[in-house]
């Protein structure tokens, strides 16, 4: 399997990106193709400079670039060239730690969405329950239609089944209450579509879920418009940071507490690890016709390695074929959209 790497992406490029990719080549047995400023990339490779192909791309997309036009204006950027290589079949998946908006737009325009999919979605897997819980969408699509959310539910269900290991993934619609009548027009119409899909045996829709249910272990896929999903995601990240800081403060409060912390140090480490983005690596762009993974912008070598591992699993999963084979069930008739 060949993975295309946007070597100039992220806050710690290219050093940490290259280190993570080399680790993936060694431990996962995948081929790596770097795209970026060749001299800088080969310098990071050191004694292994001749062991990896490097496609030169002199330009870099920064966070200051307009995401909607970045890959078109900077055609010789590492991100744009990497996406073109993926589109042309020069690799099985592509990983970048660059601008989320630019990557999503570039992937949509260059690689293309799966035929019939209206919008690609960002779908992180959050720590909850045995397998985690997928949140789809978390910011790619601020304004959504019922059909978008219907497709998110199907795609999230396939991902949870193929990649997260969930048998008959439980799909919930994020809402302000669990009753069938809760929410606005978007939620009402989406609820009806998801219920119909569930009754036809296409997905396992369990109804509306509130924010308190997301981390309960009672749902595997949470469907949301991108605005609401992003607020939930960012709030969760903030609360986790606050709680970890507060917990640290408690354990350092007295000698007795420090002794207690020493006793459960290993368990605390495991808990902290479960919240660590470096262990997850990144987020899949679901709905794109070929596997694209967005690594964290602050990725270190370990985090980027995890993103590549995620891309490998994604590419081997068969999930994209699941979507293609079931696309007719993921569309709604014109009269239902009115």
Image (cartoon, rainbow, N blue to C red):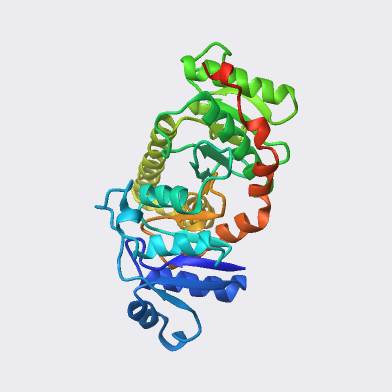
In-front residue for pair 289/279: 289
Residue 146 in the image: above or below residue 288: above
Q: Tell me residue 15's x, y (percent).
A: 37, 73
Q: Is residue 125 left or right of residue 17?
A: right
The total number of labels drawn is 0
Q: Residue furthest top?
A: 181
Identify the residue at horizontal 48%, vertical 57% (top origin).
281
Quarter holding the N terminus?
Answer: bottom right
Q: Residue furthest right?
A: 201
Q: Tell me residue 219's x, y (percent).
A: 61, 32
Q: Residue furthest bottom?
A: 47
Q: Tell me residue 103's x, y (percent).
A: 41, 52
Q: Tell me residue 147's x, y (percent).
A: 55, 27
In-front residue for pair 261/89: 89
Residue 281 in the image: above or below residue 181: below
Q: Residue furthest left?
A: 64
Quadrant of the rendered structure where residue 39 is?
Answer: bottom left
Q: Is residue 106 left or right of residue 188?
A: left
Identify the residue at horizontal 56%, vertical 58% (top origin).
311
Residue 258 in the image: above or below residue 187: below
């Amino acid at each position: 399997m060949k993975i295309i790497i946007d070597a100039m992406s992220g806050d710690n490029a290219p050093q940490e990106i290259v280190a993570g990719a080399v680790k993936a080549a060694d431990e996962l047995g995948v081929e790596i193709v770097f795209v970026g400023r060749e001299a800088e990339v080969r310098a990071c490779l050191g004694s292994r400079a001749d062991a990896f192909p490097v496609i030169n791309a002199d330009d870099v997309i920064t966070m200051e670039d307009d995401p909607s036009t970045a890959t078109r204006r900077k055609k010789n950027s590492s991100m744009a060239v990497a996406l073109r290589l993926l589109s042309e079949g020069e690799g099985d998946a592509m990983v970048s730690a660059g601008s989320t908006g630019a990557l999503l737009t570039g992937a949509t325009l260059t690689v293309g969405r799966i035929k019939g999919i209206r919008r690609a979605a960002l779908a992180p897997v959050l720590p909850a329950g045995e397998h985690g819980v997928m949140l789809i969408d978390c910011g790619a699509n601020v304004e959504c239609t019922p059909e978008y959310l219907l497709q998110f539910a199907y795609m999230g269900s396939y991902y949870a089944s193929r990649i997260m290991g969930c048998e008959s993934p439980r799909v919930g619609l994020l809402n302000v209450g669990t009753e069938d009548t809760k929410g606005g027009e978007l939620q009402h119409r989406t609820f009806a579509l998801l219920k119909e899909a569930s009754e036809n045996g296409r997905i396992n829709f369990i109804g509306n879920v509130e924010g308190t249910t997301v981390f309960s272990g009672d749902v595997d896929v949470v469907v949301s418009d991108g605005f609401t999903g992003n607020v939930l995601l960012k709030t969760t990240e903030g609360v986790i940071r606050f709680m970890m800081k507060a917990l640290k403060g408690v354990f350092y409060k007295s000698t007795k507490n420090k002794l207690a912390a020493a006793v459960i140090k290993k368990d605390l480490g495991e808990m902290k690890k479960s919240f660590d983005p470096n262990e997850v690596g990144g987020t899949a762009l679901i709905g794109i016709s070929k596997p694209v993974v967005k690594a964290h912008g602050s990725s270190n070598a370990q985090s980027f390695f995890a993103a590549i591992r995620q891309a490998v699993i994604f590419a081997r999963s068969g999930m994209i074929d699941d979507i293609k084979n079931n696309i007719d069930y993921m569309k709604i008739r014109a009269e239902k959209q009115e």
